[in-house]
Image (tube, rainbow, N blue to C red):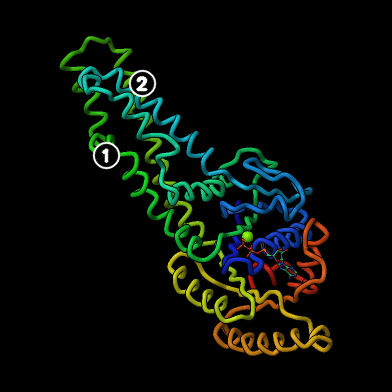
């Protein structure tokens, strides 16, 4: 059962991917009996670089209890539309009246293909991976905690809007043809057969089956959209990542407002702070350090009801399991109880 979904968002380049990956690694160390899944929601995936292994559209097991995935929305969209278009065409062929519409088959092919799905809608497919994880039958892959590396703010907000709009979106795109017949599809199969009835009972059953399949596919999209909204509301936490600079922290203030309808923000990461010592030996660092201090105060003031984690810039780029563990230690310090991270 999914107990927690942690979402990391913020301005570009502030360390969302690094901190979300480090967090997933840390939780997997602290909870050896739980299964953790890290999902990249950013089309510009970079978990492969961060972990130094080839992550892709399939689950990749990093260690005993940690998996990562960089879903490819295009592949998912192709699978969905292929299945849908094939069933639709088969059904149409079996419906003498509808079958008279010229070029229907071409039209279905043109309407239902991965390229015709708007990018925004394709992104909804990232969320499907959470639901796939929820529904998975393989005992070995029933995830308890999902960590999501989100794209920069504008795209992040758009992503949250998607599960709610998914139904509308799917309908709008796919139902140039089918919207009209959604409610009447079953009736049409009956009417057509009553009028023409050139087919036997068996055929009618098959048409019914196909129509039911199509309706089922649409209903599934609708249900999954609702389910994901509910999951994110119930067990989701948004962690905003920022650096101690004005544009970046102004952005997370807006991000919190824009997303509060969808998910609860319960923590802020202030990343890439200049270590005290470093500022002593370098003029530039010292100026930057003072600036950071000023903005850090503002952040602490603006987000005083939230948990604030501070992390310094590390000397070595935090990559690979070891690097990410070091970053996790920098971010979270000594953790006595995993709830310090999961439910601050
Ligand atoms: N605390 C840190 N110390 C040193 N380097 C860091 C730290 N945090 C992040 N980095 C480095 O900063 C760079 C940007 O980090 P990262 O890719 O995690 O940011 P992001 O917010 O995910 O970026 P994007 O918006 O492009 O997805 C990376 O090279 C990463 O290794
Ligand atoms: Mg990133």
Separation of residues labelled 2 and 1 (CA atoms)? 18 Å
**For the point 73% across and 75% down, which residue is it?**
311
Give left or right: position of 111 versus 51: left
Q: Earlier in the sequence, mark 2 or mark 1?
A: 2
Residue at the spot of label 2:
90
The one of 170 and 218 positioned closer to us in this rendering: 170
The one of 96 and 312 positioned closer to us in this rendering: 312
Rate crowding at label 2 as few (under 14), some (14 to 19) or many (20 or more) other CA atoms within 10 Å: some
Q: Please, is residue 337 above or below residue 167 in the view?
A: below
Residue 170 appears at what percent x and percent y?
A: 37, 44
Labelled disc at residue 187: none
**For the point 45% across and 64% down, which residue is it?**
262
Whether residues under marks 2 and 1 lie with C-beta atoms below 8 angstroms apart, the answer is: no
Q: Is residue 160 visible?
A: yes
Q: Please, is residue 279 above or below residue 224 in the view?
A: below
Considering the numbered disc 1 on the image, is that residue within a helix, a strand or a loop? helix
**For the point 47% across and 75% down, which residue is it?**
254
User: Which residue is at the far front?
Assistant: 283
Q: Is residue 233 visible?
A: no
Labelled disc at residue 179: 1
Numbered circles on residues, count: 2
Residue 229 appears at what percent x and percent y?
A: 45, 57
Residue 24 appears at what percent x and percent y?
A: 70, 59
Residue 237 appears at what percent x and percent y?
A: 57, 66
Report the image quarter containing ligand 1: bottom right
Q: Please, is residue 9 above or below residue 50 in the view?
A: below
Split into 4 quadrants, where in the image is the C terminus? bottom right
Rate crowding at label 1 as few (under 14), some (14 to 19) or many (20 or more) other CA atoms within 10 Å: some
Q: Please, is residue 315 above or below residue 5 in the view?
A: below
Considering the numbered disc 2 on the image, is that residue within a helix, a strand or a loop? helix
């Amino acid at each position: 059962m999914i107990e927690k979904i942690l979402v990391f968002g913020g301005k570009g380049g502030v360390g969302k991917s690094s901190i979300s990956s480090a967090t997933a690694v840390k939780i997997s160390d602290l909870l050896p009996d739980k299964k953790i899944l890290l999902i990249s929601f950013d089309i510009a995936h970079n978990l492969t670089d961060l972990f130094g292994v080839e992550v892709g559209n399939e689950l990749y097991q990093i260690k005993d209890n940690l998996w990562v995935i960089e879903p490819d929305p295009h592949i998912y969209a192709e699978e969905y539309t292929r299945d849908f278009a094939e069933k639709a065409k088969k059904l149409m062929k079996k419906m003498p009246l509808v079958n008279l519409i010229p070029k229907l088959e071409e039209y279905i092919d043109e309407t239902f293909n991965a390229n015709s799905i708007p990018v925004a809608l394709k992104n909804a497919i990232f969320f499907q991976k959470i639901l796939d994880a929820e529904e998975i039958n393989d005992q070995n892959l029933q995830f308890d905690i999902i960590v999501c590396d989100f794209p920069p703010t504008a795209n992040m907000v758009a992503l949250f809007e998607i599960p709610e709009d998914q139904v509308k979106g799917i309908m709008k795109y796919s139902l140039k043809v089918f919207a009209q017949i959604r409610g009447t599809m079953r009736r049409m199969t009956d009417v057509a057969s009553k009028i023409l009835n050139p087919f036997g009972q068996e055929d009618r059953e098959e048409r019914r089956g196909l129509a039911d399949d199509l309706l089922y596919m649409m209903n599934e999209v609708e249900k999954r959209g609702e389910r994901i909204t509910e999951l994110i509301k119930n067990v989701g936490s948004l962690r905003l990542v920022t650096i101690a600079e004005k544009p970046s922290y102004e952005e997370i203030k807006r991000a919190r407002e824009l997303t509060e309808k969808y998910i609860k923000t319960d923590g802020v990461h202030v990343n890439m702070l200049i270590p005290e010592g470093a500022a002593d030996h370098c003029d530039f660092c010292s100026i930057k350090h003072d600036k950071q201090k000023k903005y850090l105060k503002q952040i602490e003031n603006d987000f005083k009801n939230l948990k604030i984690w501070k992390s310094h810039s590390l000397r070595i780029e935090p990559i690979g399991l070891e690097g990410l563990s070091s970053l996790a230690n920098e971010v979270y310090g000594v953790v006595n109880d995993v709830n310090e991270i999961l439910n601050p």
